[in-house]
Image (cartoon, rainbow, N blue to C red):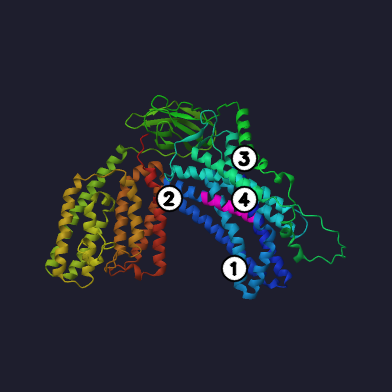
């Protein structure tokens, strides 16, 4: 954890000191101008900037969590590169503007005072907000790099607290710091760290499929250096140098570090000031606290250039070479010995070779495919087949990391080559550590029973739907619009309860339940058919004669679907997915009223979707309960809550309340209840994913 804390500590210290100096200058300017009453406006802007920074970090976390694995890699890689750009601009900006920072801020405060309270709030907000956003982005990126948030958050917190203490000391004149040297040294450190973040970000983009060269390694020390050893962890945490780096990473790291560090250190060279003639010193007047606030800002321009800075290449070359030399010396000192959890071979003949009993806790295993076929790799409990970690599609000759948390128990590797038989390594025993939850794998045979039962349920439902749509067509041929409206709702609700089969209905679903969205002529488009076309006509005054052909086509399409359904492929992996997707569509379309063509029955459709989800969950319940008993209980409670709220929206007369006419409190409660249900349903597809290790 602590090796991951240093980069965030440095960014927290530097950015915190920058922001603290800015606030000190703002406060000092107001106090000196006799405007102490305006200080709350400064603090309002500062607090708003802090709130924006925290919100920005939350948005990044939420966005990343809701992306697929590949999209997360690409998202994290892009933000890493943006963070590098911000940090690089930051260190150069402070180097260039440090000497005039105090004067510029004083001018802005003076102008803001003339324009009113709002401008002073905006001035302080903008002055602090930049540092806050940079800090949030860099810390988030560091946490992504580290794979955990505790170390980076602790490091940043310590840096910010120390920066606050330094600013207080400068303000009270109890501390003297040569801030020019401080920002130079910390800037150089951040350039080194940014080079590592750049390399890590490029690796993420390669793994996300955005950039090529993911399997072209310039450095691959997995066979001789344990990625989990203390020295490798330290080098990776501080410098982001790993035991395995692609050519793109290495070139980017070296080029960025050499170019940016050279430019940065060249810019720090300034001519030494000539000694000024001594002047008589007047008796000092009593110091005011307002004047002392400028001490930190004045110190920014106080340091003379050093002799070392005048040399062009010595310092840049040393900065580039020293990390590599230190890392090489540490590795050499380890005699190349492998510790636990070193590189593990994957192949039909070498599955698990190199695997020895690791220590408990989170481990990173370097899995290298030494065979000739692409393989699936699983870390399992050989007694129960429970899965602790997996890699899909490990190509021949490539190495990928597998991160898993280990506790007390037995562990083995299972390698499943494409088109071949599963091979299981010898088991090893881990002693100590807390109990670790694993995923009990699901096979196609496990889902065969629920799939057969669900297909039978859909077949019966389609038979009922066939009868109901024929009756709807008969109503319109008889000219009975009132009965047609009732029978339309009955048939549409029946179809909506079959939601998990939508993926197998193919083109039939568009013909039966398609919407006008995207059609060139909207509701008047000749390709607009099915339930929603009838709904529009029934509730917009169209005649039975005009609607009867539409109903006939609907009945014919339902009959065609019923005949075709037994021969259609139903992927068993669709069942776990539909537990989430049916109600996801409900939240997107029904609870927003987007699909309402005049009947106002979106909530009836939502209730039918809920019933279809319950039917599916009932079939999958044994598999879910065996893997997560608490999850199914939580989902049951969520369903009861959402179902109860739906009933509240149906008055005793039986008519459904249109979504647009719902009480705002009830509508908000419905959205919240369904959102919570979706969140609790989300783990089921992964929990019931078919794995070849089963």
Q: Assign a secondary structure to mark 1.
A: helix
Of the image marks 3 and 4, the number of the one nearer the N terminus: 4
Q: At numbered mark 3, what does the secondary structure look like: helix, strand or loop?
A: helix
First of labels 4, 2 by sequence position? 4
Q: Which residue is mark 4?
A: 11
Vertical order, 41 against 155 (above or below): below
**Residue segment shown in magenta:** 81-94
Read off the residue under disc 3: 320
Q: CA distance from mark 2 to mark 3?
A: 36 Å
Q: Secondary structure at mark 4?
A: helix
| Cα–Cα span, label 4 and label 2 | 27 Å
- Who comes first in sequence, dot 1 or dot 3? 1
Sooner in the amino-acid sequence: mark 2 or mark 3: 2
Q: Is the Cβ of the residue at disc 1 closer than 8 Å to that at disc 2?
A: no
Q: CA distance from mark 1 to mark 3?
A: 41 Å
Which label belongs to residue 122?
Answer: 1
- Residue at 48%, 33% in the rendered image: 366
Look at discs 1 and 2 and give the one toward the viewer: 1
Residue 67 - label: 2
Q: Give residue 615's mark.
A: none
Labels 1, 3: front one? 3
**Which residue is drawn at the image coordinates 25% and 43% (left, top)?**
452
Q: Secondary structure at mark 2?
A: loop
Observer-nearest of 148 and 285: 285
Instruction: Quadrant for residue 107, please give it.
Output: bottom right
């Amino acid at each position: 954890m602590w090796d991951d804390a240093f980069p965030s500590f440095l960014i927290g210290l530097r950015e915190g000191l920058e922001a603290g100096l800015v606030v000190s200058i703002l406060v000092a300017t107001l106090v000196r101008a006799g405007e102490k009453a305006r200080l709350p406006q400064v603090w309002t802007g500062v607090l708003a900037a802090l709130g924006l920074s925290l919100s920005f970090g939350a948005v990044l976390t939420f966005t990343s969590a809701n992306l697929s694995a590949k999209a997360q890699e690409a998202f994290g890689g892009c933000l890493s590169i943006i963070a590098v750009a911000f940090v690089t601009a930051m260190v150069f900006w402070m180097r260039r503007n440090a000497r005039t920072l105090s004067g510029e801020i004083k001018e802005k405060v003076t102008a803001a005072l003339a324009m009113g309270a709002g401008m002073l709030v905006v001035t302080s907000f903008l002055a602090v907000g930049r540092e806050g956003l940079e800090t949030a982005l860099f810390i988030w990126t560091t946490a992504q790099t580290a794979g955990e948030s505790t170390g980076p958050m602790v490091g940043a917190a310590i840096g910010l607290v120390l920066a606050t203490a330094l600013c207080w000391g400068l303000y009270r004149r109890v501390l003297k710091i040569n801030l020019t040297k401080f920002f130079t040294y910390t800037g150089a450190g951040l350039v080194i760290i940014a080079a590592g973040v750049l390399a890590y970000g490029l690796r993420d983009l390669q793994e996300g499929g955005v950039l090529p060269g993911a399997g072209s390694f310039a450095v691959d020390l997995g066979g001789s250096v344990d990625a989990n050893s203390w020295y490798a962890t330290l080098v990776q945490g501080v410098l982001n140098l790993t035991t395995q780096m692609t050519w793109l990473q290495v070139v980017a790291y070296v080029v960025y570090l050499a170019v940016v560090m050279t430019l940065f250190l060249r810019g720090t060279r300034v001519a030494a000031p000539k000694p000024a003639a001594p002047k008589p010193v007047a008796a000092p007047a009593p110091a005011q606290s307002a004047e002392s606030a400028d001490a930190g800002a004045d110190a920014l321009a106080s340091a003379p250039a050093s002799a070392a800075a005048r040399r062009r290449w010595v310092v840049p070359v040393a900065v580039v070479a020293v990390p590599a030399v230190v890392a090489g010396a540490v590795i050499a000192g380890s005699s190349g010995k492998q510790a636990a959890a070193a590189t593990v071979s994957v192949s039909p003949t070498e599955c698990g070779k190199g695997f020895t009993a690791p220590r408990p806790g989170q481990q990173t295993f370097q899995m290298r495919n030494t065979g000739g076929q692409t393989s699936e790799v699983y870390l399992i409990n050989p007694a129960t087949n429970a899965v602790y970690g997996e890699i899909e599609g490990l190509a021949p000759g490539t190495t990928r990391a597998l991160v898993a948390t280990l506790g007390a128990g037995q562990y083995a590797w299972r390698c499943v080559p494409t088109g071949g038989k599963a091979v299981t390594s010898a088991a090893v025993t881990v002693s100590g550590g807390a109990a670790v939850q694993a995923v009990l794998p699901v096979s196609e045979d496990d889902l065969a029973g629920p799939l057969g039962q669900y297909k039978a349920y859909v077949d019966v439902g389609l038979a009922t739907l066939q009868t109901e749509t024929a009756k709807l067509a008969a109503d319109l041929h008889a000219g009975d619009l009132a009965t047609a409206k009732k029978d339309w709702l009955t048939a549409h609700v029946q179809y909506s309860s079959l939601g998990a089969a939508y993926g197998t209905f193919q083109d039939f679903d568009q013909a039966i339940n398609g919407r006008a969205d995207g059609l060139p002529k909207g509701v008047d488009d000749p390709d607009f058919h099915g339930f929603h076309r009838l709904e529009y006509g029934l509730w917009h005054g169209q005649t039975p004669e005009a609607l009867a052909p539409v109903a006939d086509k609907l009945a014919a399409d339902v009959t065609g679907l019923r005949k075709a359904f037994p021969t259609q492929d139903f992927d068993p992996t669709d069942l776990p997915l539909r537990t989430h997707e049916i109600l996801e569509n409900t939240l997107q379309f029904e609870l927003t009223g987007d699909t309402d063509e005049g009947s106002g029955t979106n909530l009836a459709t939502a209730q039918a979707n809920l019933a279809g989800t319950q039917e599916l969950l009932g079939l999958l319940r044994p598999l879910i309960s065996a893997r997560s008993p608490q999850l199914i209980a939580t989902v049951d409670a969520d369903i009861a809550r959402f179902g109860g709220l739906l009933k509240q929206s149906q008055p005793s007369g039986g008519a459904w309340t249109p979504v647009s006419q719902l009480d705002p409190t009830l509508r908000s409660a419905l959205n919240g209840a369904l959102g919570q249900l979706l969140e609790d349903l989300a783990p089921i597809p992964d929990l019931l994913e078919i794995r070849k290790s089963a």
